[in-house]
Image (cartoon, rainbow, N blue to C red):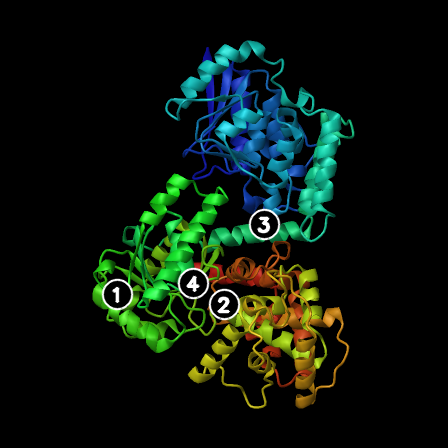
Amino acid sequence: GKVASIVLNSPPLNPLSIRLRRFVLRQLKLAEADPKVEIILISGSNSNFSAGADIVEIEKATANAGDIASNKQENEIENYPTLSDLVEVIEKCGKPVAAVVDGVALGGGCEVILACHYRISTPKGIFGLPEVKIGLIPGAAGTQRLPRLVEMDEAIDIITKGRMIKANRALKIGLIDFILPSSENALAKASEIVFTEKKRFPNQRITSQLPIKTQRNKAEKLLRHSFEKEGPPINGNEPIWSALEALSASALRNLSFEEGLEVEKNLFRRLMESQQSRAKIHLFLAQRDCGKIPKSVNRNKISPIINVGIIGAGTMGSGIAIAHLLVGIKVVLIDSSPEALARGTKLITESIKRAISRKSLPANVAEGVLRNLTTSTAIGRDLCDVDYVVEAVLEKMELKKSIFQLLEEHCAEQTILATNTSTLDIDEIASVLKNPKRCVGMHFFSPAQAMPLVEIIKGKCSSDETIASILTATKKLNKIGVVVGNCDGFVGNRMLRCYSNESIFLVEEGASPASIDRVMKAYGMRIGSFETSDLAGIDVSWHINKAREMRGSSQLKQNERNSELLDRMYEAGRFGQKVKKGWYKYEGNGRVPLEDPIVSSIIENHRKNCGFERRCINDDEIRERCLLPLINEGFRILGEKIAEKPGDIDIVWRYGYAWPDFKGGPMFWADEIGLRKVLEKLKCYEQTFTNVSHWKSAPLLEEIVSSAGLNSVRAWHKKERSRMMSKI
């Protein structure tokens, strides 16, 4: 018999755009109409089936468009098929349709295979419905077909957690029917299977006609437990709650497949209209964009990262070493102090042991990981073959400059030299090098082995190839690299200063640290400003402030408001969680912050000495005064081109400072509030606090608000990008 092969070809991940959906639909109808065709195979190109829907297309969709349209005429379906239209046509096809999966079948790609009559995979197949991660649920019957193939606990886990599973697991739970021995000749082998099995078609092969796999009583228990565990549909939890509602439609309410499908469509439509979904889609696209290497870069000059040198075996240096070791990169760890080197090595070994106990690292692999670590007490021949070096010593400029001079002497000419710093001037460090093009900043966030963000600081001499190599390295580390410009604090810490300073000003005027943290956690922050300060170390913040004063980078404008409350906390030995006392106290081995009357006394004495009269400050004022200066500084950063895109700032705050994903980031949130309203609020506070410069509205914000046709920072960026492209 004749086989019709339909190949999804939109490299590299074959997203199901309108163009691809239209192609598949037409090929299906041609194959069904051809009397010589007996079976139809759908597969993907580029070693992938499909990663799902076109996210850009989803972002542009309105509430009445996209994948939820209904009651369309036949010619409209042919020309503008939604994913729901496509999977319905696949399932209703009068000839056996088999999905042949190699690589990923995620989201809409997984919904396509659920509608196929046979699901065949190579050993490389990966399956999942991760729509909750962009604030949605499966919108093309995924919530209705999946529990007809797998048990309800598996369906709940796959959909509400966005969990991806490999082919062997997918076969075991019933998501797929067959696994091929390899990817070689997959279509030929799959067609043999379907020809053998097609005598069972259509009986038992139409997924929508199957009953829910789990018995009703058991399914009800599982779903009710999940509802209780996940809590109400608030603070970004709406998609998980909606997914459980959709799963409940057929399992608990005895609705037919078609009725359950209508429930799913209504829930999907509601989520499409929601702010939290817009926020999560924005972050998804922003994360994808910030990792792109410009086309102008010569990819042959991007350095492969196999060996790395790390200078400094303290907490940060050891954490950076762990991050590299865990992805198979060989590490030379150097510290002039044998004691520090021993402590660092112990910290690394203990971290690897914990990974084994958590079963995130097999014991046999761990042995190889530790063999990739070598140590030394001096910068020398050990670094002659490394691809790049990360210097992670104390934040002292002269120390770093002397180390970079030594590195240039002992490293190969092509070795990239990176400094891990949160505040220091990259250009000043690079000034001691004969070839400053290879110098770059890498601001890892603590703990470096766990935090996903790295700010990649481009100095005035850093070459494009150097930046591209470091972007590639961060991807290999499974981290998110965001390229930023060189200034005091770069993006994240520069904005954080405004947030932290205003938090302290609020305390001086009458708010308590606990009340400020409560308001910010209610907004969605994982922890509040003062809890963050205790975690990072009040002494660390104090030393950074003093170092900035010494460098002259924190010179205050005349009459500028400045608080000495942090000095009082430092003098009292309130260094934070590590000494069990900071803005809060910490009892036993616990990390639960408890209000401390000693801190209240320190604050009250400070107020009296500075002439502050305590007043009641409501939650709205606390929230506005914490967030608006931070947002305003973001506009300054964009205007100064320290950040290239608004989304870059949002990614820094999402992954470096735990900004809630359902709020999208500071710049996204500014657009949601409305830029005109943001500007009006800033000007109002500027009149009240005339001696605080962070209330002075950023020139770029004023420019956007006053420009005709621009109503958001994203619209401004789109216009700027078009202007730059036209110049090119």
Residue 417: name its quadrant. bottom left
The amino acid type found where label 3 is placed reads Ile
Residue 270 as seen in the image, left or right of residue 488: right
The reply to whether dot 1 and dot 4 touch (C-beta < 8 Å) is: no
**Residue at 45% in and 19% down:** 190
Asked if residue 500 is positioned above or below residue 191 in the image, the reply reads below
Of the residues under marks 2 and 1, which one precedes in the sequence? 1
Q: Which residue is mark 1?
A: 379
For the residues marked 3 and 2, what is the alpha-carbon distance in whole angstroms? 22 Å
Of the residues under marks 4 and 3, which one precedes in the sequence? 3
Instruction: Tell me the SS state at disc 4.
Output: helix
Residue 155 badge: none
Residue 268: name its quadrant. top right
Which is more foreground, mark 2 or mark 1? 1
The amino acid type found where label 2 is placed reads Val
Asked if residue 620 is positioned above or below residue 132 in the image, the reply reads below
For the residues marked 2 and 1, what is the alpha-carbon distance in whole angstroms? 31 Å
Q: Which residue is mark 2?
A: 491
Asked if residue 201 is positioned above or below residue 567 in the image, the reply reads above
Residue 316 badge: 4
Residue 508, position as x, y percentages in the image: 67, 81
Q: Nearer the viewer, residue 143 or 373?
A: 373
**Residue at 66% in and 60% down:** 672
Residue 708 as seen in the image, left or right of residue 187: right
The amino acid type found where label 4 is placed reads Met
Which is more foreground, mark 3 or mark 2? 2
Pointer 2: residues within 10 angstroms few (<14), some, or many (20+)?
many
The amino acid type found where label 1 is placed reads Ile
**Residue at 68% in and 32% down:** 72
For the residues marked 1 and 4, what is the alpha-carbon distance in whole angstroms? 18 Å
Q: Nearer the viewer, residue 475 or 635?
A: 475
Q: Which residue is mark 3?
A: 281
